[in-house]
Image (cartoon, rainbow, N blue to C red):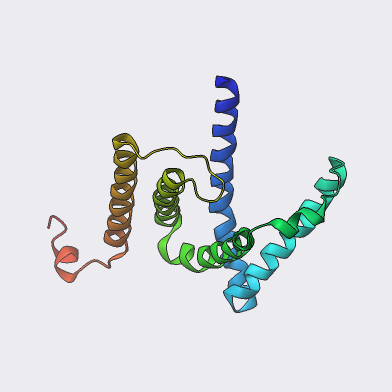
Amino acid sequence: MLLRFITFLILAALGGSAITVQAGLNAQVGRMLGHPLWATLVSLTVSVISIVPLLVIFRVTPPNLSTLDSAPWWVWVGGALGAFFITVALMAAPELGAVVFVSAVVMGQTIASILLDQFAIAGFPSRPVTIWRVLGALLVVVGVLISAWAAQAASKPPTEASISNPQT
């Protein structure tokens, strides 16, 4: 049980690192193509092209599409949210830098996750809000604020006074 948990924890961390790299690469594609939405389309197209061979390699049986008739309308929002995230990432990551961007993403995920767990939304089982979860979320928010402040402080050009008197 613990090994399974650790395995999924490592996979989640690797997935998180992939998101960071993906944001930078997609931003480069967006600059080359002239608009973030073109880069989003390219990214999603490459995703489809990448998943098809895996379906074949793992011999995944085709789904029963008739089950989608009973799906609630809101399950389709997931695809739109993926496109939204990719577009936001390739616009925001170059402006914020990797650390601030990913920290802000984790902050948004943490806050949304507390709500999803508390109210059992989007298929998640109910896991009540506890003081420890709120404290963890607050630490994430503080981490984002510190990272953002540090990034802003580092990006400010030196003033004339600090150049002539470096001890100030």
User: Residue at left 58%, top 20%?
Assistant: 1
Residue at horizontal 39 percent and vertical 50 percent from the top: 111
Classify residue 164 as left or right of residue 128. Answer: left
**Is the residue 55 above or below the residue 11 in the image?**
below
Residue visible at 48% across and 62% down in the picture: 93
Asked if 126 appears above or below 78 in the picture, the reply is: above
Q: Where is residue 77 in the image (x, y as percent from the top left)?
A: 59, 63
Describe residue 121's horizontal placement relative to residue 68 as left or right: left
Q: In which quarter of the image is residue 4?
A: top right
Q: In the figure, is residue 18 to the left or right of 143?
A: right
| Between 58 and 118, the one nearer to me in the picture | 118
**Is 7 on the left-hand or right-hand side of 99?**
right
Q: Which residue lies furthest to the bottom in this view?
A: 34
Q: Which one is in front, 165 or 97?
A: 97
Closest to the observer, 153 or 49: 49
Instruction: List x then y, in percent, for residue 135.
Output: 29, 39
Which is more toward the observer, 83 or 160? 83
Question: What is the count of numbered marks?
Answer: 0
Query: What residue sits 55% from the left and 51% below the top?
Result: 122
In the rendered image, the vertical position of residue 47 relative to residue 114, given as above or below: below
The image shows residue 112 at horizontal and vertical percentages of 43, 52
**Residue 21 % position (x, y):** 57, 53
> On screen, 133 above or below 149?
above
